Amino acid sequence: EVQLVESGGDVIQPGGSLRLSCAASGLTFSRSAMNWVRQAPGKGLEWVSGISGSGGDTYYADSVKGRFTISRDNSKNTLYLQMNSLRAEDTAVYYCAKRSWGFDSWGQGTLVTVSS
Amino acid sequence: EIVMSQSPATLSVSPGERATLSCRASQSVGSSLAWYQQKSGQAPRLLIYGASTRATGIPARFSGSGSGTDFTLTITSLQSEDFAVYYCQQYSSWPLTFGGGTKVEIK
């Protein structure tokens, strides 16, 4: 059974930085394309970023491009999202998700609150 | 960017009835379309991929259809556990995009 466990969410001031982690188990991680999806309070789902299994290809939503960096450590079966220059509108639950045809496995999410 | 639009925003249905949800893409996504179910306080769950293929463990009362720009999720004989928010998503091209969601509520 695939398990994805996010961590790193916190309350952070605008302009600050935060790194999220997603620990994966029950899958061949290095062969799995991974993504981050977020959901602002009371709102819908927003895709944030994606990365190929090797880490060689990365993709970003325009709303986070230049501020967020996705990466992975296949030796640790862990996905990361480095978030810089955080804004109030980045406040959301952040989910990591494994992509095959669609996102077939999701973590439980970690809450990031950007507020002064 | 491909914009995904879902209708209606809210659908009121009685248990045992059929629900029909629509999703439209601003340009063709072929069959690269997924549907998700999300219950309050939970992560989304993949229901359908490839526009019409049920994901593992998804009951047969869920079915998807369509291709190109117009897609439909049909839930026959709604059960109590089916009342939730449903999202479509295209994975044809980057950036990946979700629709705004349809809330299926008890009538």
Image (cartoon, helix red, strand yellow):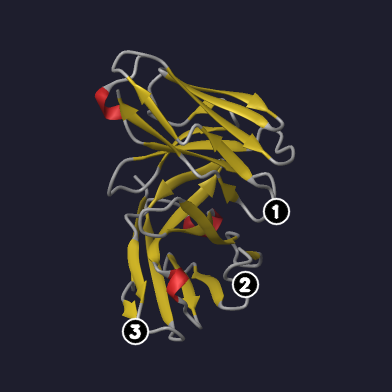
The percent position of residue B53, horizontal first and vertical second, equals 54, 26
Instruction: Residue lying at the far right in this picture: please name it.
Output: B27
Along the horizontal axis of the image, is B66 left or right of A102?
right
* Residue annotated with mark 2: A65
Spatial separation of the CA atoms under disc 2 and disc 3: 23 Å
Disc number lying in front (2 or 3): 3
Question: Which residue bears the numbered disc 3?
Answer: A116
Q: Name the amino acid, label 2.
A: Lys
Mark 1 touching mark 3, by CB under 8 A? Answer: no
Q: CA distance from mark 1 to mark 3?
A: 32 Å
Chain holding disc 3: A
Of discs 1 and 3, which sits in the foreground? 3
- Under circle 3, the secondary element is loop
- Asked whether B68 or A106 is in front, the reply is B68
Name which residue lies at 66% across and 38% down: B25
Q: Position of residue A11 (x, y in %)?
A: 31, 78
Question: For mark 1, what is the residue?
Answer: B1
User: Circle 1 marks a residue in which chain?
Assistant: B
Residue type (three-letter) at the residue carrying disc 3? Ser
Secondary element under disc 2, as helix, strand or loop, is loop
Local crowd at mark 1 within 10 Å, few (<14), some, or many (≥20)? few
